[in-house]
Image (cartoon, coloured by chain):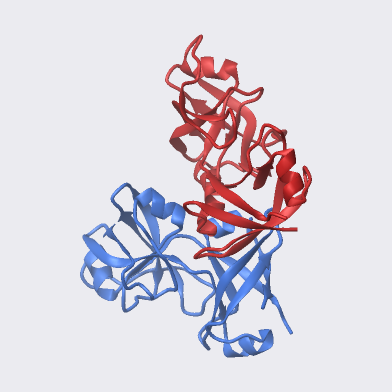
Chain colours: A red, B blue
Amino acid sequence: MENKVLVETSARHVHLTKEHVELLFGAGHELTVKKALSQPGQFACEERVTIVGPKNQIERVSILGPVRKASQVEISLTDARTLGVAAPVRESGDVAGSAGCKIIGPCGELELKEGVIAAKRHIHFTPEDAKNYGVEDKQIVKVKIVSDRTTIFDDVVVRVSPDFKAAMHIDTDESNASCAFGEIYGEIIK
Amino acid sequence: MENKVLVETSARHVHLTKEHVELLFGAGHELTVKKALSQPGQFACEERVTIVGPKNQIERVSILGPVRKASQVEISLTDARTLGVAAPVRESGDVAGSAGCKIIGPCGELELKEGVIAAKRHIHFTPEDAKNYGVEDKQIVKVKIVSDRTTIFDDVVVRVSPDFKAAMHIDTDESNASCAFGEIYGEIIK
């Protein structure tokens, strides 16, 4: 049974609704693909925004496309402290009662009431991957990363969808804490 | 046998030689105690400096006293990326061939050729603590932190000295990656 998974680092980024794209970049604007990401259909955009909290702002934050049903800001807890927001650790899409922030684009700005989270570390698997690795959707596993700062991440949630490609995603704090740099694989421990 | 240790987060900071204190803050200047730290005799200072790398600078960085035999800058790897320096993960004092940076104070500036590191996570123990916990100086252990992001840190070095007080030190990336906030204890796993 397989147990090694590619570990990728997600830098801070924003997901936007179609409405918010138009508000920030102008009526009728559509996101411009800069680079395809590992997850099929997902892409980094040429467009950037500024995110603003009570204490500071962070400029040139990436937008990931395509547009979503709800806007969401995924930051590290280092960023959260910089901005002065209390971002909870959440799975993507689970934003009820999370933190808010202001988002500024070249054509407008908006006040996001909620949607600012630190992403819960997770593994993307297809149903076939899940079978090969002996895990199920929503299962919590540990992942060991061997590096200059060998670390075992507990509380890693497995997410299964035919639209995914096998990869574990951690944020920049987690990547720096475990020196998970370059092409690196983690060992899944159940 | 005891196995729980207090986990403290070290934010970025600078240690300076007496010579460098005078260079940055003026001839005859002595560091001003702002707050005692957990390790006996160690203190945070009122004085602050700016550290400058090829890409960016970070302002208002804390100085920890008393003065040392060699100046040293301890940053997170998030900071290292911000500054644009390749800080290695090292034990305090092990700075040969590490990264450099510029340090700016109100009365002068200096070019540190080496001394910029990301601190290797470690536990301070007195000889008596070491006996109680069944560990030795330089031993590598794992420490499990149970939190919203439960994590097992491997590669934690035990350091034993009669001048210490029992505490594990991690940096802000490690703290954020493991939600090691507030008064939190880790479990030592040998």
Residue A132 appears at what percent x and percent y? 73, 48
Q: Quadrant of residue A110?
A: top right
| The N terminus of chain A, quarter of image | bottom right
Q: Residue at x 50, y 9 (%)?
A: A27
Q: Nearer the viewer, residue B99 or A131?
A: A131
Residue A69 appears at what percent x and percent y? 66, 22
Q: Residue at x 47, y 79 (%)?
A: B41
Q: Is residue B172 visible?
A: no
Q: Nearer the viewer, residue A124 or B151?
A: A124
So how many labels did they put on this image?
Answer: 0
Q: Residue at x 53, y 58 (%)?
A: A177
Q: Is residue A50 left or right of residue A150?
A: left
Q: Quadrant of residue A59?
A: top left
The correct choice, above or below, for B13 with respect to A93 in the image is below
Q: Is residue B164 left or right of residue A92?
A: left
Q: Is residue B40 visible?
A: yes
| The C terminus of chain A, quarter of image | bottom right
Q: Quadrant of residue B178?
A: bottom right
Residue B2 appears at what percent x and percent y? 72, 81
Residue farthest to the top?
A28
The correct choice, above or below, for B24 with respect to A124 in the image is below
Residue B121 appears at what percent x and percent y? 53, 69
